[in-house]
Image (tube, rainbow, N blue to C red):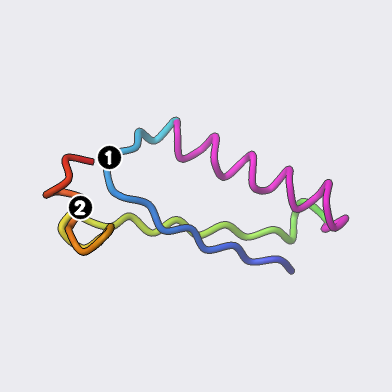
Amino acid sequence: MPIMQVFLIEGRTEEQKARLIAALTDAAVESIGAPRETVRVMLQEMPKEHFGIGGKTAKELGR
């Protein structure tokens, strides 16, 4: 059973997250032959203040 964990900076729509889950599921099915019903995708959204890029938070960088 493939389990994929994805960390995202908050702010994506429900539709965008659903498309990401579908695309990652498709990738696991196509690339490793995983049965679709066994694929698990976990999205974890992070506040911009909790994500660092080059020593600054994503909020400081305006991302």
Q: Which mark is residue 48?
A: 2
**Which badge, 2 or 1, comes first in the chain's sequence?**
1
Q: Residue at x 71, y 66 (%)?
A: 2
- Viewport quadrant of the N terminus: bottom right
Q: Residue at x 44, y 30 (%)?
A: 15
Q: Is residue 31 left or right of residue 27?
A: right
Rendering quarter of residue 53: bottom left
Q: Residues within 10 Å of mark 1 (few under 14, many from 20)?
A: few
Q: Residues within 10 Å of mark 2 (few under 14, many from 20)?
A: some
Q: Residue furthest left?
A: 60
- Viewport quadrant of the C terminus: top left
Task: Check if mark 2's residue and mark 1's residue have beta carbons within 8 Å.
Answer: yes
**Disc 2 element:** helix
Q: Which mark is residue 31?
A: none
Q: Which residue was labeled with disc 1?
A: 11
Above or below, comparing residue 35 to residue 19 in the picture = below
Q: Identify which amino acid the numbered label 1 is placed on.
A: Gly
Q: Position of residue 29 (x, y in %)?
A: 80, 50
Q: How many marks?
A: 2
**Disc 1 element:** loop
Q: Residue at x 27, y 40 (%)?
A: 11
Q: Is residue 2 left or right of residue 45?
A: right
Q: Main secondary structure of the magenta part?
A: helix
- 2 vs 1, front mark: 2
Above or below, comparing residue 37 to residue 12 in the picture = below
Whether residue 12 is in magenta: the answer is no
Q: Position of residue 17 (x, y in %)?
A: 45, 40
Q: Residue at x 15, y 58 (%)?
A: 49
The residue lying toward the viewer, choosing from 20 and 53, is 53
Q: Identify which amino acid the numbered label 2 is placed on.
A: Lys
